[in-house]
Image (cartoon, rainbow, N blue to C red):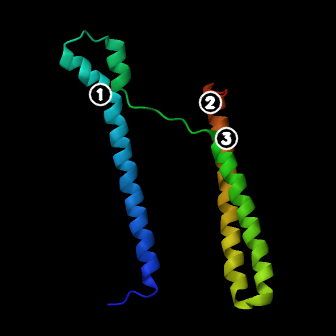
């Protein structure tokens, strides 16, 4: 049985599945590591402060850093512009590749612009909540 052109697609979806499962396992291990001191204190019979127990049991809330989205958007937009320029250079060598490569560049630019817009939206949302400053 020969997969031919489907082997790349199969490898891609296997990679996506492995990446998803690895993320889930990583979150589980991180949560277990956070609860390990609490478990050790209970086993030793130590008195536990209710504030510490509540803080450890509360789900960890991660805030999206708008700077990371902005940097990703700038890099992605720049890469898309580069791919669009590549389409024009490829047009002289392989004219059939012009439109697909140009389309890929346009998609990358659209993703980059979307990330920049998302960064602005997150920044405005954090400002409305009064959570601005370094490290937010």
Tell whether 78 sits left or right of 114: right
Is 63 or 128 nearer to us in this picture?
A: 63
* Precedes in sequence: disc 2 or disc 1: 1
Give the CA distance from mark 2 to mark 1.
Answer: 27 Å
The N terminus: image quadrant: bottom left
- Evaluate whether residue 117 shows in this view: no
Image coordinates for residue 74, horizontal then vertical, percent: 72, 53
- Is residue 50 placed above or below 14 in the rendered structure? above
Is 124 or 15 nearer to us in this picture?
A: 15
Q: Which residue is mark 2?
A: 135
- Residue drawn at x 80%, y 80% is 89
Q: Which residue is mark 3?
A: 67
Q: How many marks?
A: 3
Q: Which residue is mark 1?
A: 36
Callout 2: few (<14), some (14-19), or many (20+) C-alpha neighbours within 10 Å? few
- Is residue 20 placed above or below 131 in the rendered structure? below
Tell whether 110 sits left or right of 89: left
């Amino acid at each position: 049985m020969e997969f031919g052109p489907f082997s790349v697609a199969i490898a891609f979806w296997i990679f996506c599945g492995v990446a998803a499962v690895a993320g889930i396992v990583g979150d589980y291990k991180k949560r277990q590591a956070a609860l390990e001191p609490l478990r050790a204190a209970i086993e030793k019979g130590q008195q536990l402060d209710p504030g510490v127990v509540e803080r450890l049991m509360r789900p960890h809330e991660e805030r999206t850093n708008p700077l990371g989205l902005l940097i990703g958007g700038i890099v992605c937009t720049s890469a898309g512009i580069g791919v669009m320029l590549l389409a024009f250079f490829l047009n002289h060598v392989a004219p059939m590749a012009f439109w697909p490569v140009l389309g890929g560049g346009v998609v990358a630019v659209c993703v980059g612009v979307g990330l920049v817009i998302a960064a602005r939206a997150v920044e405005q949302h954090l400002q409305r909540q009064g959570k601005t400053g370094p490290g937010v």
